[in-house]
Image (tube, rainbow, N blue to C red):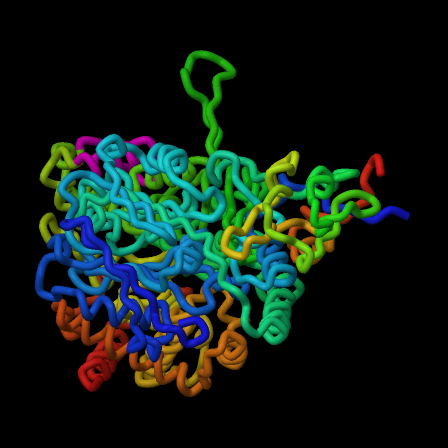
Amino acid sequence: MLDNRPVRVLLIDLDKKEIMVEQREDLNGWLGGVGVATCLLKEHLLPEEDAFSPAQPVVLAIGPMATIYPLVTKAVAMFKSPLTGELGESYAGLRLAMSMRFAGYDAIVIKGRAAAPSYLTVTPRQVQFNDARGLWGLSTEESGHILRQLSPGSGHRSTLRIGRAGEKQVAFAGVVVDTYRHFGRLGLGAVLGSKNLKALVIHGDLNIPIVNSAKYNRIYEKIYRQAVETEIMEKYHGLGTTGNVEPLNALGALPVRNLQASSYPEAVNLSGETFARETLIRKLSCSGCPIGCIHIGLHRRQFALGHEHEYESSAVAYDHELVYALGTMLGLTDHRHVYALIEKVEQLGLDAISAGVALAWATEAQEQALIGLQELQVELSFGQTAPYLTALDNLVSQPTAFYQALARGTWFAAKEYGGSQFACTLGKNEVAGYHTGYANLIGQAFGARHSHLDNAGYAIDQELQNKTPAVAPEEIVERIIREEEMRNALNCLIICLFARKIYQFPVVTEALSALGLCWTEEALLALGKKIYREKMALKKAMGFRPEEITIPARFLETSAMQQRLSSEVVESLRRVMVEKLAAL
Amino acid sequence: MPGKILQAKGMSRCIACYSCMLACARMVYKSFSPRYSAIQIRTRGGIQSRLAADICRGCLDAPCATACTAEAILPRAGGGVKFNRKKCVGCGVCAQKCVVQVIYFDEQACRPVICIQCGICTGFCPHDVLSMEVRQNA
């Protein structure tokens, strides 16, 4: 990887408590990150077997520029998703990429199932298999405290852990990374739970000497100054991603009350401006990023009601997707109530987007009498926080068959109980917080991991808004695929996608050259295309059938950016996309 | 005019981006690794807690210099030390003698990672946490 050394892969077998280190020169052509992870997933995956089969792999990978350049801060996880039954791909920041880099591993593959609850400690010199029986059942926060006490390397380590949701194999359980970041989407937490793996602590303190110091320093400084001294990154530092809430609401693109509406007056109470003014207390960064986009708010509330002046508080991270899924989607009208739900989701170790969308669907299903108190054990109502807190606990403890179904995802529960037409899922994954139009729908429905981040269809919609004559379906599909291919290339590095305007391909090639890696812009794009094809082939092997993808009626019923979407246009886009994927 | 020393007076503003650590490692120690930096940003009980900077406090008549029999570490006017890597014999006594325990001894290279009060880290702090100032009692 770095200086063209072979990709260094740590293989961990939980069954046998054995490790092996591979030097994989053959993977160098895949650059790193998602390229390398896709290859390793393909190599170890049992495509037709269940996501919870012990032999299924979990792959973690970083790119050649991780921590070495500003804003290159992410690690990727790839696995078979228990939520969709196909490609699992998720990204996390904070200290994970740095810890892997300086532990000396470009990728880690975990297979097997530990005989009893366990956690792993990975350092440059050893891998320990530790007893986690005392951690099993603990919240992500409590287990984090204990793991920090038990593990070496304060400041140079990353602590990944699952909560009870992962232990109970809720299909959309996530993994908490260093308290404030996550492998949120597509159920990695459940996969780790199925492996009896509560946590993974990675400590990296290796010295990696700089070879071409003058060239590297010059390019580093250029990127750093662009990040901190221009306006490019300001919105992420300023209000952060919740700065999107008000503009999306004004556009009529903010999903509200299970997407029964795409704007509401109370959105102002959940805006980035409100959060910042009322409760923002600090900002944090991933290691090696000078931006500080992680916004932390004070969640302060009274306890021991009846006694005056008794307060407890915690510091909770908020972002647009959380405010959407656990706020606007549930019809909340006070930003302080969103904190309560975020904190609950964090402690249980659930993916916030999937959890919020599942509750929004359940609320409407109850309104329509598809389910009742017997199934839900609590009366849900848009705008009411307390019942949602109970329902989140129930999602994990699963006291009824209904919650067991909902723990397999909104798509599955709707199939069992009815209400698929208003289940806000695409490709079996709960949707992100944008209702902008056709490219957003098609992008999520057909993206490799059914995520808004696959191809940013929401941005394409905003660019194409009010274009006359209307852009042809072929061009929209082309733009979606092109964006996804380009993002695949960037995700080999793995830059924070917030910084994609800084890391244009010419900058990437120059940055790589200072590390002894010769890549042209054409080669990067070709790699992005190759990864796209590989991922789609893997999906098909796992059972993905593009022609079976449907778009729930709710997405067409509720206007997107003031426009009622036409089923004919959706159908023509769907047809073009299916043809494109068949021709790959 | 005595030399200035590194101060971290704005730690409540620190975002833990590690840009300062990476700058020291990159420009002084020629390493990609933030462990090879003379400034270390740490949490005090997880990232929810306050952050603290482990930095050289710029001792006058620094014990690390007093202890260096090879004269690789010499006191610096205004506080802190000057370090001559070529003279260092790798005994590691400086790290043991540091009052605030912020000298990291690199066992691999047999050399200390020690602050030379160059101020490079301050130029890479995006939140005005770090500064170079004259020592109060210099």
Q: Residue A275: x and y, percent?
A: 53, 43
Q: Residue at x 59, y 42 (%)?
A: A277
Q: Residue at x 18, y 40 (%)?
A: A168
Q: Residue A302: x and y, percent?
A: 45, 22
Q: Nearer the viewer, residue A337 or A507?
A: A507
Residue most extreme to the top:
A307
Image quadrant in which the N terminus of chain A is located: bottom left
Q: Residue A223: x and y, percent?
A: 59, 69
Which span of residues is magenta-colored? Answer: A377-397
Q: Residue at x 22, y 74 (%)?
A: A536
Q: Residue A548: x and y, percent?
A: 14, 70
Q: Is residue A302 visible?
A: yes
Residue most extreme to the right:
B1
Q: Is residue A411 magenta?
A: no
Q: Nearer the viewer, residue A313 or B69?
A: B69
B125 left or right, relative to A6:
right
Q: Is residue A559 visible?
A: no
Q: Main secondary structure of the magenta part?
A: helix
Q: Is residue A333 shown above or below A425?
A: above
Q: Nearer the viewer, residue A479 or B67?
A: B67
Image quadrant in which the C terminus of chain A is located: bottom left
**Residue A557 falls in image quadrant:** bottom left
Q: Is residue A390 magenta?
A: yes
Q: Is residue A131 shown above or below B25?
A: above
**Residue A469 falls in image quadrant:** bottom left
